[in-house]
Image: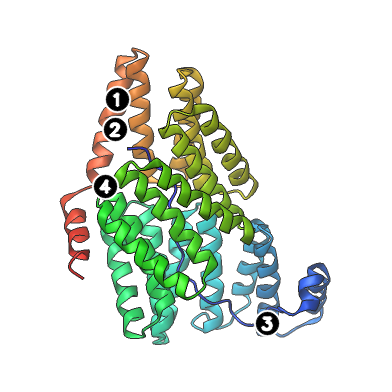
Amino acid sequence: MNKRFYIYLIVFLFSFPGLGTGDAFAKKPESKKDSLKREIDKNENNLEKSELFFQLAKYYSGEDKNDSALYLFNTAYQLLSDTLTDEADKILNEIGLIYYHQGDFADALSSFKKALQIVIANNDSAMIARRYGNIGVIYDHLGDYVKSIAYYQKALKIFEEQDFEKGMAFIYNNIGVISEEMGNSENALLYHKKALKMKTALNDKSGMGNSLNNIGVVYEQLLSNYDSSLFYHKQALKVFDELGDKRRIAISLSNIGVIHWMGHEIDSAIFYSEKALGIFKLINNEDGISSAFLSLGRDYFEKENYQLAESYYLQSLRTSKKINSRKRITEIYEALAKLYNKTHQDNKAYLYHVKYTALKDSLLNEENNRQIAELKTR
């Protein structure tokens, strides 16, 4: 089965108040940043200074200048005298988001867990649910499906108690993703369509794009219906283009490339995969980079350019190991085993087949399948 991107939605639903959103700031963001820098230089109150660093970091984050944003968020956190406050939680969550978008899942998990401890200590159930959702996303990326589902269910229980439809829709999205990953495509389609219905009612454009993307994936996996799949992916791309969301634009391009690959339109597949790779490199998203390398490896394998295919596979493997993406490492091991078998390198083919089988079995165990089956009884 060929894998492609899903949108793993971080359940962070509200921007923290404090950033200017009026026309003056929207038209001249540079002047606002300069103003914040001047205020930081003259302010001697650490709590106020922390908030100013936070606001400045948000501007850099919005411009995809993640290294600068990360430095500023960390500075804001270090200025806090009390690290069990709402201010500490919001900073840690933003730090986690940046690590997540960079594909650094281990550091993202650490930040989200620290934030969770704060909101638990403060008995803030609304934020507890959001942090549970974030942690569930990261465990999914790390291939720990049991923990991922457990955190999603905790988040969903709170959202349902609060009748918070937007939160419920986001969790439906993520349960749909993990259901398909575990081979339950019908359940995945059910959850994604529930999410799309809620997001449409809420006029949540970004959320609608997410669900359109994911429905496109499931249509290909469930029904091998490439025409419907391509339709949904192009609808998602249109939404993300309108929103100017670079990461999700790259995801849609990657998915469209895979559909062309499935239809043996390899030149078109390479075109879309290379466009996706360029954007992922631009925004320094290592998870996306590793996925695009893998797609290009498969494209060139199909063209029987085995040397170039091997090069892309190995680049994907290095990047995937760097970010500890066990799911993708499994796919790469399988791809390398097939490549070396095709090129009559029997020892290497056997080695990578053994690695593939061992890692696959550790990810897809009986307990994971039991957890997925329980979702159908909700």
Between 236 and 53, the one lying in front of the other is 236
**Type of amino acid under label 4:** Leu
Q: Which residue is mark 3?
A: 46
Colour scheme: rainbow
- Quadrant in the picture for the C terminus: bottom left
Q: Report the mark closest to the observer, 4 or 3.
A: 4
**Type of amino acid under label 3:** Asn
Q: Judge the density around disc 3: few (<14), some (14-19), many (≥20) Cα neighbours within 10 Å.
A: some
Q: Which residue is mark 4?
A: 363
Q: Which residue is mark 1?
A: 351
Give the residue at x 47% y 35%. Answer: 260
Label 1 close to label 3 by CB (< 8 Å): no
Q: CA distance from mark 2 to mark 1?
A: 6 Å
Classify 99 as above or below 83: above
**Type of amino acid under label 1:** Leu
Q: Which residue is mark 2?
A: 355
State which tag comes first along the sequence, 2 or 3: 3
Q: Report the mark closest to the observer, 4 or 1.
A: 4
Q: Secondary structure at mark 4?
A: helix
Q: CA distance from mark 2 to mark 4?
A: 13 Å
Q: CA distance from mark 4 to mark 1?
A: 19 Å
Residue 110 visible somewhere in the drawing: yes
Classify 264 as above or below 204: above
